[in-house]
Image (spheres, rainbow, N blue to C red):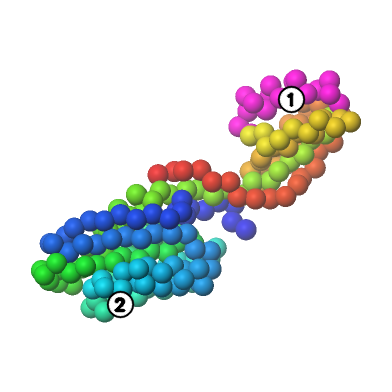
Amino acid sequence: MLPSYLTVKGYGEHEIVIQKSRFIAFISRAETEEEAQEFIQKIKKEHWNATHNCSAYLIGENDQIQKANDDGEPSGTAGVPILEVLKKRQLKDTVAVITRYFGGIKLGAGGLIRAYGKATSEGLTATGIVERKLMAVMHTTVDYTWLGKLENELRSSVYSIKDIHYLDNVEIEVYVEENQTSAFTDWMTELTNGQGKIRKGESLYMEELVQ
């Protein structure tokens, strides 16, 4: 699992008009090729009367799945420019469909490349980009006499409290970046004079809007 990566916030759409042609960007997250294909087919079905439904997607930790489709536009003028924008933004697990309704004015190869690139870029911005960080849930179990001190220290630190369980002893769950678990353990051990029981729980991704 990657320590962090960028992807789109979720579903989004955005329309621009270039030389009387409508370009509508439909953006979504897709973690498998099947999800990406389903999304593309859904947009094609909804916009069956469009001149073109061009698409691209980028999937996998190492971008191992990459596809671009010109859907009838001159080769290399639509799908590839869409894919290049996804790469330039360093996105993963993202699918984009640019639907075009022809407005009567031909754009030429260069114009098409610029138009599909611009539609994709603006569509991504409208959708929103998030950074997903791999976080470990660290569990610290202590006597209740330590609760006040630990809570105060944690709330003024870089760490986020996930939950507090009030049992025979108190258990505090904290989100910690995967590469900081050792430093967190050392810090907690010091704060509790070695009396805290600290263990690592599950790892999961947390999202933060970056643009």
Tell me residue 175's x, y (percent). Answer: 66, 40
Disc ID at residue 194: none
Q: Is residue 210 left or right of residue 123?
A: right
* Cα–Cα span, label 2 and label 1: 58 Å
Query: The magenta stretch spans which residues?
Result: 143-159
- Where does the C terminus fall, quadrant-wise? top left
| Other-residue count near label 2 (Cα within 10 Å), few / some / many at <14 / 14–19 / ≥20 | some
Q: Judge whether 176 appears above or below 46 on screen.
A: above
Disc ID at residue 150: 1
Q: Amino acid at mark 1?
A: Leu
Q: Judge whether 99 appears above or below 132 on screen.
A: below
Which one is nearer the viewer's eye here, 182 or 155? Answer: 155
Please report whichever mark, 2 or 1, sits nearer to the chain's N-terminal start: 2
Q: Judge whether 180 appears above or below 203 on screen.
A: above
* Residue mark closest to the camera, 2 vs 1: 2
Name the residue: 64% across, 34% down: 159
* Magenta stretch: includes residue 153: yes
* Magenta stretch: includes residue 115: no
Name the residue: 78% across, 23% down: 147
* Residue at the disc numbered 2: 71
Is residue 148 at least partly visible in the picture?
Answer: yes
